Image: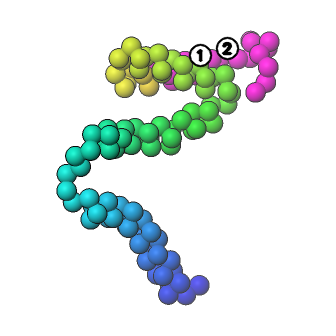
Amino acid sequence: MSYSYLLTGILIMALVTYFPRMLPLVALRKKIKNRFLQSFLAYVPYAVLAAMTFPAVFSSTSSFYSAMAGLLVALLLAWRNQGLLVVALGAAAAVFITEQLLPFLSFLPAV
């Protein structure tokens, strides 16, 4: 493979990732005054983070049941206004305990 193809590929990838970031900054130089648009844009980072994280929750453990236990504990702790460390440790503990108990819970259907 010649270096010209490699450099062309790198240049194309750089442009594809640079333009979506640069265009809003160039196009929207004035302050956004629309309250609906401001409110919508305020939630975009949280929505993107949730869309990237949520599917990984169900594939990160060996069982669907332990993933659900961790998710439910995390949601409960977050709903009770606990800090991020408490939520993460609580969810990890719930997954660990559920994984340890799963061999004894043979009545659960395989998912």
Q: Residue at x 35, y 17 (%)?
A: 81
Magenta region includes residue 105: yes
Side (left or right) of 57 relative to 83: right
Q: Nearer the viewer, residue 26 or 97?
A: 26
Per the image, the residue denoted by label 1 is: 97
Corner quadrant of residue 77? top left
Magenta highlight range: 89-111
The percent coordinates of residue 92 (x first, y second) are: 51, 24
Q: Main secondary structure of the magenta part?
A: helix
Magenta region includes residue 62: no
Q: Residue at x 76, y 27 (%)?
A: 111
Q: Nearer the viewer, residue 102 or 111?
A: 111
The residue most toward the left is 30
Q: Are marks 1 and 2 in contact (CB under 8 Å)?
A: yes
Per the image, the residue denoted by label 2 is: 101
The answer to whether any part of residue 96 appears in the image is: no
